[in-house]
Image (cartoon, rainbow, N blue to C red):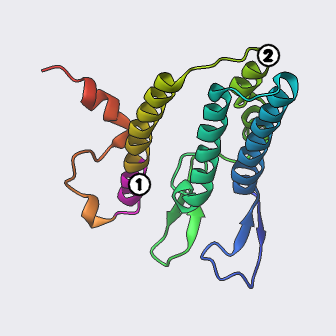
Amino acid sequence: MNPRIPIPFLEHPRRSFDIKTFIEIRVGLISWLLFDVAFLVKQYDRYGYVTDSMWLIVAFQSFYVVDALWFEDAFFSTMDVAYVPLTSGVLIFSRTDGSGFMLDMGNLVWVAFFYCLQARYLVSNPVTLGPLSVAGVLALKGVGYYIFRSANLQKDKFKADDPSVRGTTCNRPEFIFDVLTRTY
C-alpha cells in the first residue's frame, strides 16, 4: 500500500506523486515546526520575553525539520518509505511500512501534536539556562548531530551499494551504540 498519483510528464525516476511521503515529510514535519513557532510566540505574549531554553528547543527542532527537507533523497532509504531500485532503473516500494490509517494518522497527529510538547511545556513553565548551560547544550548537540548525520549518510550510501562505503569502520550505523559501549 503506497498511494501514488501518476504524473507522466515528470522526469523523476518515480514519475509519480507519493502521497505517503508528502504526508510524512511535508505535512507532519512542517506542522510540527509551525506549532513550535506558535508556542514561542505564546511565551513572548505571556511573559514579554522568550527564554533561552525555548530558543534552543525551537532552533534545534527547526534545524531537524530543515535537515530532513534538505536531505530528502536520503529519506527514501528509510524504513518508512523504502524504495528498492531494480536493474532497469525503475524504483519500487519494498516490504516495509505501507501507507495506512496508523502511519498517516501518526504523521498527521502524533508528529505535529506530540513532538512539540517540549515547547508547550516551556510556555507554562519557563526555564532560563544561562550562558554556560547554553554553551554545553550547543556543544553536545553539535557532537550528536555530527554522529547522526555522518551515520545516516553512510547508511544511505551503503544501501545504495556504493563501493566506497565497503570496509569502513561501521557498516551498520544503527549499532553505533553497541560499538561505543562494547567491553573487551
Q: Nearer the viewer, residue 159 or 88?
A: 159
Quarter holding residue 144: top left
Q: CA distance from mark 1 to mark 2?
A: 38 Å
Q: Is residue 17 left or right of residue 144?
A: right
Residue for point 62% across, 52% down: 66
At x 34%, y 34%, the residue is 175
Q: Residues within 10 Å of mark 1 (few under 14, many from 20)?
A: some
**Which residue is outermost to the right?**
45
Point out the residue furthest to the bottom here.
9
Residue under the image location 71 percent in, 48 percent down: 24
Q: Nearer the viewer, residue 132 or 14?
A: 132
Q: Is residue 57 magenta?
A: no
Q: Quadrant of the C terminus?
A: top left
Using the rendered view, name the quadrant where residue 130 is placed: top right
What is the number of the mark on residue 103?
Answer: none
Q: What's the amino acid at mark 1?
A: Leu
Q: Which mark is residue 153?
A: 1
Work out whether 97 lies above or below 76.
above
Residue 144 in view in this figure: yes
Q: Residue at x 80, y 27 (%)?
A: 43
Q: Is residue 5 left or right of residue 134?
A: right
